[in-house]
Image (cartoon, coloured by chain):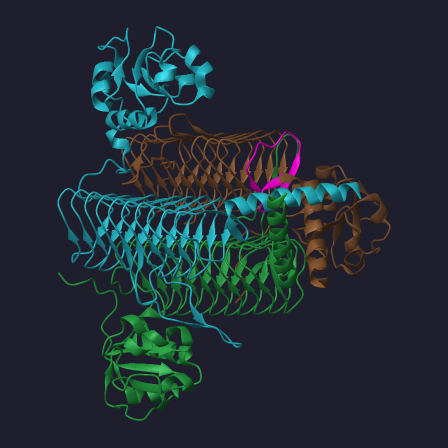
Chain colours: A cyan, B green, C brown
Amino acid sequence: MTEPQFFKAPAGLTVGQIAELTGARVCAGARLEHLISNVAPLDRAGPHDLAFIDNAQYLDALISTGAGACLAVERFAAKAPSRINVLCIAEPYPAFVAVARRLYPEALRPTTLFGSQGVAPGAVVHPSARIESEVTIDPGAVIGPHAGIGAGTVICATAVIGPHVQIGRHCSIGAGCSITHAVIGDDVILHPGVRIGQDGFRYQLGARGHTKAPQLGRVIIQDHVEIGAGTTIDRGASGDTMIGEGTKIDNLVQIGHNVIVGRNCIIVAQCGISGSAVLGDNVILAGQVGIADHLTIGEGAMIGAKSGVGSDVPAGEKWFGYPACPSQEFIRATVALRRAGRSRKKD
Amino acid sequence: MTEPQFFKAPAGLTVGQIAELTGARVCAGARLEHLISNVAPLDRAGPHDLAFIDNAQYLDALISTGAGACLAVERFAAKAPSRINVLCIAEPYPAFVAVARRLYPEALRPTTLFGSQGVAPGAVVHPSARIESEVTIDPGAVIGPHAGIGAGTVICATAVIGPHVQIGRHCSIGAGCSITHAVIGDDVILHPGVRIGQDGFRYQLGARGHTKAPQLGRVIIQDHVEIGAGTTIDRGASGDTMIGEGTKIDNLVQIGHNVIVGRNCIIVAQCGISGSAVLGDNVILAGQVGIADHLTIGEGAMIGAKSGVGSDVPAGEKWFGYPACPSQEFIRATVALRRAGRSRKKD
Amino acid sequence: MTEPQFFKAPAGLTVGQIAELTGARVCAGARLEHLISNVAPLDRAGPHDLAFIDNAQYLDALISTGAGACLAVERFAAKAPSRINVLCIAEPYPAFVAVARRLYPEALRPTTLFGSQGVAPGAVVHPSARIESEVTIDPGAVIGPHAGIGAGTVICATAVIGPHVQIGRHCSIGAGCSITHAVIGDDVILHPGVRIGQDGFRYQLGARGHTKAPQLGRVIIQDHVEIGAGTTIDRGASGDTMIGEGTKIDNLVQIGHNVIVGRNCIIVAQCGISGSAVLGDNVILAGQVGIADHLTIGEGAMIGAKSGVGSDVPAGEKWFGYPACPSQEFIRATVALRRAGRSRKKD
């Protein structure tokens, strides 16, 4: 039995075509007609694979690689064995990604899990839903009344789209997602099990019990957003929860009601963003970060992994720690603490 | 195209009716017949919206608001522009919530995602299940043998109710939930993707492999509990995992086997409560808190965000930190640490 | 109404049969024919229940227990009331687990939620899927093209198995799981809502937007692995994400692309393992631990709860803290910090 094949074998590109696609310079001795049909890291690449090198720590791997071609920065190009077709470029990784995207167009977004076209048998679509052309709806998916699904969008098996929800074009909605009280733009990817639009967590606390504050807002997801498996985004209490264009969110992230996330943010797995927090554009949160409610994280700020942020972070700053502070302070405090621990040992 | 409307436009209440509902005092000049049809924050409110103010930081917003009416504490009432109908009350927020609840009764709990009544086509209900009157079961939901669903309960699309599970009356079970080995009270809300009743995490560890300890208990969820999207609650090993009446749990929380959570607790997103821990009544855990196994958190204790609790917490105390300690100690230690970091800088 | 019965009442074992099964020594006075039909903790055990004691803190419970039989270490055996059938053994807990496993064979892995046999009506199986004998597929499950399901495996309600995925024999795939781009061994248990095989989180970052790097690898799950509810495991970028034989993973864990987890590891709830990290065999991660990308955690290392690991951990070491360091250092630093906090109080 052969190994399972999850993506179609690519037709491939010649070394010359890769140079053209990426703008790389073909180094002396390279065979322009050599066919590249896959991408791989240097240490596992074979004669029809493209690899790349942009870091001196992989020089040994370069020398022993079996790769058919390699994208390399200038200073490493000369180190490559002559059997390799070398393509010289200032930034090899983006070029490598560009080739991988060309070879595997079907890997750019999740697709039907059932080989479906149109509405599969076993999908349940409300007659009042508005389904545009070339929409794929897998078995077990449920589309509620007055929902709208834009052209070219794929709704994977067992995903549930609630009443009146609007989804744009060329989106991929993963298996088992649920979406309610939401408006979703174009080219949005939701990985499996994403939960969008449920009630935010707000109660009028009382000694004898807590009273739920109705959650009346929506979730707005702008174009080109990608959201990881199992992530939860609550709808606004009265205004909306917003995820800005081009933002990428990893798995198991929690985003509370009325949060505003700017454009092109990166939010790594298991972060939690409390209600009404605001993230500017291009903010990066590393894994397991927590942001307290109503805070503002300025444009371009970066927060280190597992930080607990309890105050506003100015634009462009790097913060770290619990409670989070500017990274340099955190590093100094950690060093001081370790020193204190060691001197105590001597006591 | 108009904006999607996720909730029905409310019939509205007059200022006089709001005064009656909330017990607020109508301030001089207010028009009792003015119609209020929505709620909104001061800065976004229009002429038929009710807003509220209980904090001086919103005084500017009060002065420029377009709100038709405002619930205000006594000392702010006189600051409101004369165009606003002012309702004077000691605690504006609970009154605001009461009005919102009256305006939007359908927002008090999740409802069918398919406009279903009764058992929708595409739902799969075992013939031995006992379904009371006025139960709604959406398409794609699966109800196992001998399960019982109480009157007025809604089972949303693709939710799965396992064999013998008993669910009370007027519950809402969100899309994609799974419930096994559990008994659930009345007026319980489960948001989408909640996982209840799977095996706890217990093995007899061995150098050559780990042996699963059978998990033979149940999960008991008492009345008026609300559980957020993606939260997981494991069943007991031999006894039961219990969630006390009125407790509210946010998204992506993990509750281990044999945990006992008291009444009216608040557990914010991404907390983890390890096996056999006991929380008294009215405990509050802020976001991302971890509680080690077999600990007792006393009645009314409050644990700060992202704390790692490794020892019992006495009733009524506020703890914070990693490892968690009384909040005052944590604050002092943090200050000392920052000072040490700064003095090290001067070295 | 009687209490819901989630497991069949066991036929039971005599005290003599328990001695034989576990190798325990029957103490003087024990009645070999006494029937044991259940297991329970000392404080709740009745005349036909088996309990165990291996810790002096439970001696009071031993003296007042109503248990029919008790597994006990030598030094506690004499303390038991004469009405109890005492079985003497060096390690009571493993013996207790062995009896529980014999009494409740159906609790060893999740089973059908619908009393199904074969492919239930309401399941959707692609005609090209290869389903071996004695496979159970619940209603609402979806099996994609060219998927393979091994003999004796159970696919619970609404689980989704993507194209070409291979699942071994005697596996249990919980309700609402989704599996794509994966090869899964024998005797694997996935609890509800597990997400396997979605894209890893990797982008070519750019000031004007981020470009997705295609994720071309797989997830390989070896035999005897168990994975908790809501856990997410991303597929490899070019190589594979691997979970080694016998490893047990708890709920809501995140495992990034290209992570290699060794054999017989224990990974407690809400841990996050970043891309390309490598865990040796028998590593233990306590709850809410974070591991940064590309790190190596050596064989047998143990990481304390909520630690944030930012550097490699040598084999066999115990680390703790944020940032994590050897446990002794963390403890000393914590003590020093508390002392600094207290002396500051005196200022």
Of the 4 image quadrants, the one containing the N terminus of chain A is top left
Residue A199 position within the rendered picture, expressed as x and y whole percent measured from the top left: 37, 63
The part of the chain drawn in magenta is C303-324
Q: Is residue B69 left or right of residue A325?
A: left
Write the residue at 25% across / 59% down.
Answer: B114
Above-or-below relation of C118 to A243:
above
Write the residue at 39% across / 81% down.
Answer: B95
Residue C50 in view, yes or no: yes
Write the residue at 60% across / 34% down.
Answer: C283
Which image quadrant is residue C124 in? Answer: top left
Question: Magenta region, mostly helix, strand or loop?
Answer: loop
Along the line of sight, the residue nearer the viewer: C342 or A63:
C342
Along the line of sight, the residue nearer the viewer: A203 or A127:
A203
Above-or-below relation of B3 to A131:
below
Write the residue at 32% across / 32% down.
Answer: C213
Name of the residue lying farthest toward the front: B346
Name of the residue lying farthest toward the bottom: B28
Of the 4 image quadrants, the one containing the C terminus of chain A is top right
Q: Does the magenta stretch include residue C308?
A: yes
Along the line of sight, the residue nearer the viewer: B60 or A283:
B60
Along the line of sight, the residue nearer the viewer: A57 or C38:
A57
Which image quadrant is residue C210 in? Answer: top left
Residue B126 in view, yes or no: no
Residue C342 position within the rendered picture, expressed as x and y whole percent measured from the top left: 71, 59
Residue A106 position within the rendered picture, expressed as x and y whole percent measured from the top left: 25, 31
Above-or-below relation of A85 to B87:
above
Residue A287 position within the rendered picture, expressed as x and y whole percent measured from the top left: 46, 44
